[in-house]
Image (cartoon, rainbow, N blue to C red):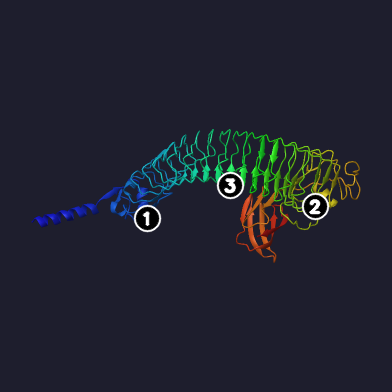
C-alpha cells in the first residue's frame, strides 16, 4: 500500500509541474510567444512555464507591448530585445543570466539592472528615463543610454566599459575616472561643466560638444583619433600629445591660439568661430579640410599641406594667402579679408572660389577649370550657350581696386562673370596677360573686356574625395540626375538626388569613370572620377 501511495503522489506532482503556468496579461506579448512557438492557440493570459524557462533569446521589438509581466519566469534568458514598444516599466531582476538587454524606444522612466551582474550590453536609448542604476552590472562593456532625461549617471562600478553613449540628456557632471578601458565616449548635448579623461588612456573617440566646458585636458589620451569639442567655452586646447588625431572639431569656443603641428595624421580640422590670432598647421601634412573662418587671423601658412582640398579662411584679417603648394585645392573661401593679390596659376582643380570683399588689385585665375565644379582634370569646354548656364561657384566681387584679371579665355570669363550675377565689380576687366594690371585696364579691347551677361540660375556642386576608393560624396542644393559611365560609355550608376548624397562605388573596378549631372533645366555638367 505504501508503494502505491508513493507512486500516486509522484504522478500528482508530475502533473502539477507540467500544468504550471506563467501569467501573461498583455495579449500582444502572449501573441508574440505564440508566434515564436512557446504557446499555442489564441491568447488566454498565460503560457506553460516549462515552455519558457529554458529560452535564452527573446526578440519581441515593435510589437505594441505595454506590459512584460511574465518575463520573470524566463530565468535562462541571456538576450532580451523589447525595444520599440510601449513599456512604462521593466523588471529584469529575476533574469540574472542576461548579457544583452535592448529596451530602447519605450516610455520607461526608470531602469534597474543592478541584479544583472553578467550584463555586457545595455541599450536603453530614447526613453524618458530619469533614473538608471547600473551599479551591479559590473561586466558591462557597452552602454547606450542617450536621448533620455537623466540628470546623473554613476558608472564608477562599470570598470569594463568600452563604449559609453550618454548624449542628449540633462547631465551636469560625469565621472569616468574608473573606466580605464573606455575607447569611445559620447556625452555631447548635456550641460557638463567639467570632464576629466586623464584615466582613459585607451580613448579613441571623444565627443563632448555642446556642453559648458571651460577646459579640457587630453594630454593623457595618445590614442585619440576623433575629438569633437565644439560649442563649449574652451579658452585653450593642447593636442600636442595626440599624434593619432585624424578629426578635430573645436569650433564655436573662445580659443585664441591653436597648434596642430604635431598632428601629422590630421585630416579634418574645424576651428571656426573662435578668437584665433594664431593657427599652426605646418606639421599637419595629411590635412584635407580646414575651416578656420570667422577668427582674427592675420596670417595663414598652408604651404606644408599638399593634400588640402577645402579651405575656408573667410572673415579673418589676412593680408596675404599663398596656395601655390595646394594643387588639390577644390574649394576656397577667402572672402572678407584684407588680401591685395591672389595667384591661382598653380591651381587647376578649383570648383568653388569666393574671394569677394577684399582689397585685391591683382588676380591670376588662368588655370581655373571652365567646368565649374569640384574635381581634377576638367573636361574640355563646351560651346557657350546663351544665356550662360554654368553654376555660379566663383565670386570675385567687392574688390573695387581689381581692374585686371588674368585669364586664359576672355570669352569664357566675360560670359561667366557678370555684374548682373553679382560675382564681379563693374570696374573689373580681363586680359590674357596683365603686364601692368593695376593701372592699364582698358575696356573694349580684344584681350581686355568688361564683363556683362546674365545666367539662368546658380548651382553649387562639389565632389570628394577624387580619386575615390569606396564612397563618393556629392554635395548639392538642387535636384540632379547623376550618371556614371565607364570609358567604353557603359552606364554603371544612375541616381536622382536633391541634396548631399554619398555614392557607394566599392563595387566598381579600378579605373577612370565619367560622372554627369543633369539639372532640372536639362543642362549637363561633366566630371572625370578616378576609382582606386
3D distance between C-alphas at marks 2 and 1: 68 Å
Residue displayed at 30% across by 54% down: 51
Asked if disc 2 and disc 1 are in contact, CB closer than 8 Å, the reply is: no
Circle 2 sits on which residue?
A: 367
Residue 483: x and y in percent read 66, 58
Label 3, residues with CA under 10 Å away: few <14, some 14-19, many ≥20: some
Which residue is farthest bottom? 488
How many angstroms separate mark 2 from mark 3 (CA)? 36 Å
Q: Which mark is residue 35?
A: 1
Within-10-Å neighbours for mark 2: few <14, some 14–19, many 20+: some
Q: Locate the C terminus and report the quarter of the image it occupies.
A: bottom right
Q: Could you say where residue 396 lies in the image, as x and y percent from the top left? A: 79, 43
Q: Secondary structure at mark 3?
A: loop
Q: Earlier in the sequence, mark 1 or mark 3?
A: 1
Labelled disc at residue 225: 3
- Name the mark nearer the viewer: 2 or 3: 3
Q: Report crowding for label 1: few under 14, some 14 to 19, many 20 or more residues within 10 A (C-alpha).
A: few
Amino acid at each position: 500500500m505504501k508503494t502505491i501511495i508513493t507512486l500516486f503522489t509522484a504522478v500528482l506532482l508530475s502533473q502539477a509541474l507540467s500544468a504550471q503556468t506563467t501569467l501573461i496579461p498583455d495579449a500582444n506579448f502572449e501573441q508574440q510567444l505564440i508566434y515564436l512557438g512557446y504557446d499555442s492557440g489564441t491568447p488566454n493570459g498565460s503560457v506553460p512555464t516549462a515552455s519558457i524557462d529554458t529560452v535564452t533569446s527573446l526578440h519581441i521589438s515593435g510589437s505594441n507591448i505595454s506590459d512584460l509581466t511574465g518575463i520573470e519566469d524566463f530565468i535562462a534568458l541571456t538576450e532580451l530585445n523589447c525595444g520599440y514598444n510601449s513599456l512604462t516599466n521593466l523588471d529584469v531582476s529575476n533574469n540574472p543570466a542576461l548579457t544583452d538587454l535592448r529596451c530602447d524606444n519605450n516610455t520607461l522612466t526608470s531602469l534597474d539592472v543592478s541584479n544583472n551582474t553578467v550584463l555586457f550590453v545595455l541599450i536603453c536609448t530614447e526613453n524618458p528615463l530619469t533614473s538608471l542604476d547600473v551599479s551591479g552590472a559590473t561586466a558591462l562593456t557597452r552602454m547606450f543610454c542617450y536621448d533620455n532625461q537623466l540628470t546623473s549617471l554613476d558608472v564608477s562600478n562599470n570598470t569594463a566599459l568600452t563604449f559609453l553613449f550618454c548624449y542628449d540628456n540633462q547631465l551636469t557632471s560625469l565621472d569616468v575616472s574608473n573606466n580605464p578601458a573606455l575607447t569611445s565616449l559620447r556625452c555631447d548635448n548635456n550641460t557638463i561643466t567639467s570632464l576629466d579623461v586623464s584615466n582613459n588612456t585607451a580613448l579613441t573617440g571623444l565627443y563632448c560638444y555642446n556642453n559648458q566646458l571651460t577646459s579640457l585636458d587630453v594630454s593623457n589620451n595618445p590614442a585619440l583619433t576623433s575629438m569633437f569639442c565644439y560649442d563649449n567655452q574652451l579658452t585653450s586646447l593642447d593636442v600636442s600629445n595626440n599624434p593619432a588625431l585624424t578629426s578635430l572639431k573645436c569650433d564655436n569656443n573662445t580659443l585664441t591660439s591653436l597648434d596642430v603641428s604635431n598632428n601629422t595624421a590630421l585630416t579634418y580640422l574645424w576651428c571656426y568661430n573662435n578668437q584665433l590670432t594664431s593657427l599652426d598647421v605646418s606639421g599637419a601634412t595629411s590635412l584635407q579640410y580646414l575651416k578656420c573662418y570667422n577668427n582674427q587671423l592675420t596670417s595663414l601658412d598652408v604651404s606644408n599641406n599638399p593634400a588640402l582640398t577645402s579651405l575656408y579662411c573667410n572673415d579673418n584679417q589676412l593680408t596675404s594667402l599663398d596656395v601655390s603648394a595646394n594643387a588639390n585645392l577644390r574649394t576656397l573661401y577667402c572672402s572678407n579679408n584684407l588680401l591685395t593679390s591672389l595667384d591661382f596659376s598653380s591651381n587647376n582643380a578649383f570648383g568653388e572660389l569666393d574671394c569677394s570683399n577684399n582689397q585685391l588689385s591683382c588676380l591670376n585665375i588662368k588655370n581655373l577649370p571652365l567646368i565649374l565644379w569640384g574635381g581634377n582634370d576638367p573636361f574640355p569646354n563646351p560651346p557657350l550657350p546663351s544665356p550662360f548656364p554654368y553654376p555660379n561657384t566663383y565670386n570675385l566681387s567687392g574688390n573695387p581696386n581689381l581692374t585686371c584679371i588674368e585669364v586664359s579665355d576672355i570669352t569664357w570669363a566675360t560670359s561667366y562673370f557678370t555684374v548682373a550675377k553679382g560675382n564681379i565689380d563693374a570696374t573689373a576687366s580681363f586680359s590674357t596677360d596683365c603686364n601692368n594690371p593695376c593701372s592699364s585696364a582698358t575696356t573694349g579691347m580684344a584681350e581686355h573686356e568688361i564683363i556683362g551677361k546674365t545666367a539662368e540660375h546658380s548651382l553649387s556642386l562639389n565632389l570628394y574625395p577624387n580619386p575615390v576608393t569606396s564612397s563618393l560624396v556629392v554635395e548639392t542644393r538642387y535636384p540632379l540626375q547623376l550618371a556614371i559611365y565607364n570609358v567604353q560609355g557603359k552606364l554603371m550608376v544612375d541616381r536622382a538626388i536633391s541634396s548631399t548624397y554619398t555614392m557607394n562605388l566599392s563595387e566598381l573596378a579600378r579605373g577612370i569613370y565619367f560622372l554627369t549631372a543633369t539639372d532640372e533645366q536639362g543642362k549637363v555638367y561633366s566630371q572625370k572620377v578616378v576609382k582606386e
